[in-house]
Amino acid sequence: QKEVEQNSGPLSVPEGAIASLNCTYSDRGSQSFFWYRQYSGKSPELIMSIYSNGDKEDGRFTAQLNKASQYVSLLIRDSQPSDSATYLCAVNRGSNYKLTFGKGTLLTVNP
Amino acid sequence: EAGVVQSPRYKIIEKKQPVAFWCNPISGHNTLYWYLQNLGQGPELLIRYENEEAVDDSQLPKDRFSAERLKGVDSTLKIQPAELGDSAVYLCASSLTGSTEAFFGQGTRLTVV
């Protein structure tokens, strides 16, 4: 079983719709959870972090964490063509441990 | 605030040649990471530094890869000799000590021919 799993996509949504990106992880000791956005040919950019169960909202982005189900998701409301990118899920057991990434989900937002 | 700076952005070398990558982390960030990203994959950790100490180098192929972080600021990652399979993007990231939020540099795209 892979440590962090994501659907590779591509996930295609129309402009203005809600994009839902999902991630599961295998290490029950994971404490920190992150979403990075990576445009083609660019480096990963941290867009959301979440540490406790529930929802965390930042603008059009909402991260959701369910530790019991070992599941973390990212919702993007009012999707824009500029949101088209690969979204990487990453988890960490703590500051003394490495950050483990999934393969990423390619999101395409169609005008 | 300046971000993580890496150089060069691109490098093309012949196999068996040496290559080095340089990273300057965000000011005040004592934790520095080197990641490798292959096409279509997520970044994978090569080595993590706390100040000048390598605290996790278990994923670094030590037969050909080496890294150093003198004075606990800038870092250099070296490959000698390079192999065709080393073609990838090498990413440097940094974070505050005790924080798990890592910020990445622009990366160095290495092509070995």
Image (cartoon, coloured by chain):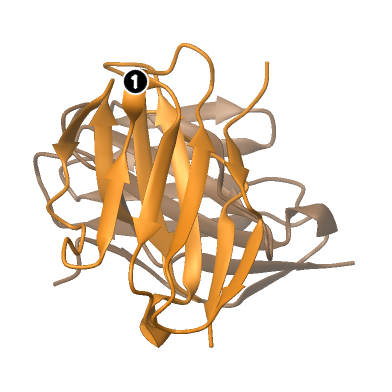
Chain colours: A brown, B orange
Tell me the residue that label 1 is attached to: B72
Q: Do we see residue B43 in this rendering?
A: no
Callout 1: SS:
helix
Q: Is residue B66 above or below residue B73?
A: below
Residue at left offset 22%, top offset 42%: A98
Locate residue A73, reporting x and y percent.
43, 49
- Residue B18 location, x and y as percent? 42, 67
Q: Which residue shows up at 12% across the image and 52% down it?
A: B58
B79 to the left or right of A81 = left
Residue lying at 26% horizontally and 32% vertically, measured from the top left: B49
| Left or right: A47 in relation to A51 | right
- Residue type at the position of mark 1: Gly
- Looking at this view, is B80 or A76 the one in front? B80
Q: Quadrant of the C terminus of chain A?
A: bottom right
Position of residue A19 in the picture relative to residue A109 (left or right):
left
Residue at the right extreme, as displayed: A111
